[in-house]
């Protein structure tokens, strides 16, 4: 088994890197564990206060459960991955059954932040992108998919995303084995990563 951690700021292109990496590996040998699924359940928080939750702060994540699930997968045990709703800020009663695979990808803005998580990873990747590129991607996504206005996106970026990125996400670079600039557009880097992972899998089988 080979465990990969992929971190990077909101709008950096993490999801595209993960998708392209999976396309280059054998079908069915990769499972992705999104860090977004492991936000803490806020059903105990009054509804009117849930809109104030800072999803870009480390305290928003259930690190204990995420670390436990990665450990279980590494031991060859299946997990029940939570389903988190941004609308209600709560976990669904349903879960997603995940079986262990040859490659486990843990993907999220702070996937490399926690020491206990890093210790379980065989390869740590940070997806990098210029701040203006990330803002443009976030703006396109939030306006088209989440119904926000451009003004709302910019206000949130200045108030939350930018300071949280500088304080918690950017420092994760120091823990990365590989930094991928230009996100999902960097096909050369993704090709090299895929070759490296394939090589490691072959060596693990020998």
Image (cartoon, helix red, strand yellow):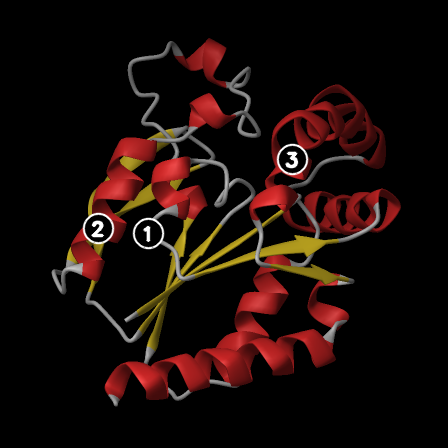
Q: CA distance from mark 3 to mark 2?
A: 25 Å
The quadrant in which the N terminus is found is: bottom left
The quadrant in which the C terminus is found is: bottom left
For label 1, the crowd category at 10 Å Cα-Cα, with few meaning under 14, some 14 to 19 and many 20 or more, is some
- Measuring 17% from the left and 53% from the top, which residue is drawn there? 72
Image disc number at residue 171 = 3
Horizontal side of residue 12 vs 151, given as left or right:
left
Q: Judging from the image, what secondary structure is the residue with disc 2 in?
A: helix
In the rendered view, would you say 163 is above or below 1? above
Q: Quadrant of residue 68?
A: top left
Say if residue 28 shows up in the picture: no
Q: Judging from the image, what secondary structure is the residue with disc 1 in?
A: loop
Q: Earlier in the sequence, mark 3 or mark 2?
A: 2
Horizontal side of residue 132 vs 22, given as left or right:
right
Q: Label 2, on which residue?
A: 71
Circles 2 and 1: CB distance less than 8 Å?
A: yes
Say if residue 60 shows up in the picture: yes
Q: Earlier in the sequence, mark 2 or mark 1?
A: 2
Horizontal side of residue 28 vs 60, given as left or right:
left
Tell me residue 106's x, y (percent).
Answer: 42, 55
In the rendered view, would you say 145 is above or below 90? below
Q: CA distance from mark 2 to mark 1?
A: 7 Å
- Measuring 36% from the left and 47% from the top, which residue is drawn there? 119
**Which label sits in the foreground, 2 or 1?**
1
Tell me residue 191's x, y (percent).
Answer: 63, 83
Q: CA distance from mark 3 to mark 1?
A: 19 Å
- Measuring 73% from the left and 23% from the top, which residue is drawn there? 163
Q: Label 1, on which residue?
A: 120
Residue most toward the right? Answer: 132
Tell me residue 44's x, y (percent).
Answer: 29, 14
């Amino acid at each position: 088994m080979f465990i990969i951690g992929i971190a990077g700021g909101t709008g950096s292109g993490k999801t595209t890197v993960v998708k392209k990496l999976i396309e280059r590996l054998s079908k069915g040998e990769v499972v992705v564990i999104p860090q977004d699924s492991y936000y803490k359940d806020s059903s105990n928080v009054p509804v009117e206060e849930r809109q104030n939750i800072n999803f870009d702060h480390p305290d928003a994540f259930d690190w204990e459960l995420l670390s436990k699930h990665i450990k279980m997968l590494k031991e060859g045990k299946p997990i029940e991955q939570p389903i988190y709703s941004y609308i209600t800020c709560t976990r669904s009663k349903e879960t997603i059954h995940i079986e262990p695979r040859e490659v486990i990808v843990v993907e999220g803005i702070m996937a490399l932040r926690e020491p206990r998580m890093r210790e379980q990873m065989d390869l740590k990747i940070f997806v990098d992108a210029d701040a203006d590129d990330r803002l443009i991607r976030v703006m396109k996504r939030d306006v088209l998919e989440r119904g926000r206005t451009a003004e709302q996106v910019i206000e949130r970026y200045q108030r939350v995303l930018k300071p949280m990125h500088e304080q918690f996400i950017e420092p994760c670079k120091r823990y990365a084995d590989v930094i991928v600039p230009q996100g999902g557009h960097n096909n050369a880097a993704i090709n090299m990563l895929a070759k490296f992972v394939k090589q490691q899998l072959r060596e693990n089988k020998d």
